[in-house]
Image: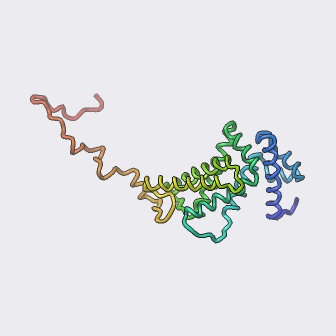
Amino acid sequence: MDGMDSMDHEKFDQALIGAAMARAEAVGWRRVTVVEAAREAALPLDEARVRFPMRTTVLLRLGVLADRSALVDDGSTGTVRERLFDLLMRRIDVLQQYRGGVQAVLRALPFDPPLALLLTAATGDSMAWIAEAAGIDTIGLAGRLRVQGVVAVWLQAVRAWDRDNSEDLSETMAALDKALGRAERVGRMMQRPLFGSGLPAAGPELIDDTLMPDPGMPDPGMPDPAVPEPPTPQGAADPGPVDPLT
């Protein structure tokens, strides 16, 4: 495999991922090994060791393949919501090619916290790419919140896909569309649109809006003008300042 070019690497990765996912479907993810997957795909073990040093590399590479498929620039137009729908469905289409294996991974996640944490981080990175490709501002605090919103939408779509036995994935598409609509409504309620036209800048003004007190509310460090100070009883002396050290 010396002198492999990028196309050879891609074919190698796809072959090993396919074998690993087929093995996961047959015996469960926890019983999958890179060695067995390489042998099943008739791939040299020395190159498999370099390309897939850990079993989890299979899942990370699968995520990258899904991202690449989604991010291919096909010149599509439309609203941000429409582009986001298309991008996420392209990722689903890749998962569909390895359906049984991916479902085996989903079943293993509750019993493998380190794997769940790893895939959570990888999903966040993927959704940041997807969000920005769809035209969503991902910079700053507001941007990170938008990315988390896209992650939530993606997870709802994956749950629907896991249950969807239709040939055209109509149930998955319906669930994804519903999740996008819910995200839009939440964004409007928070006055921080998740996507769409007129996205607010993710700059200091968001932080100021969040941390500064509402102009209609009293400053917590000042007495409320609507609540009068209680009168001092007649004959009672003003205690004066209190020494914090006594």
Q: Position of residue 81 (x, y in %)?
A: 55, 61
Q: Please give left or right for residue 234 compared with residue 65 in the image.
A: left
Residue under the image location 57 percent in, 56 percent down: 177
Residue 88 picture quarter: bottom right
Is residue 163 shown above or below 70? Answer: above
Q: Position of residue 102 (x, y in %)?
A: 73, 47
Q: Position of residue 187 (x, y in %)?
A: 47, 55
Q: Is residue 73 visible?
A: yes
Residue under the image location 82 percent in, 45 percent down: 23
Quarter holding the C terminus is top left
Which one is nearer the viewer's eye here, 4 or 8? 8
Residue under the image location 21 percent in, 41 percent down: 227
In the displayed orientation, state which residue is furthest to the bottom. Answer: 75
In this figure, what is the number of numbered marks? 0
Q: Please give left or right for residue 203 compared with residue 35 in the image.
A: left
Residue 66 picture quarter: bottom right
In the displayed orientation, state which residue is furthest to the left. Answer: 235
Q: Is residue 64 visible?
A: no
Which one is nearer the viewer's eye here, 7 or 93? 93
Q: Position of residue 195 (x, y in %)?
A: 51, 60
Q: Please give left or right for residue 191 compared with residue 6 in the image.
A: left
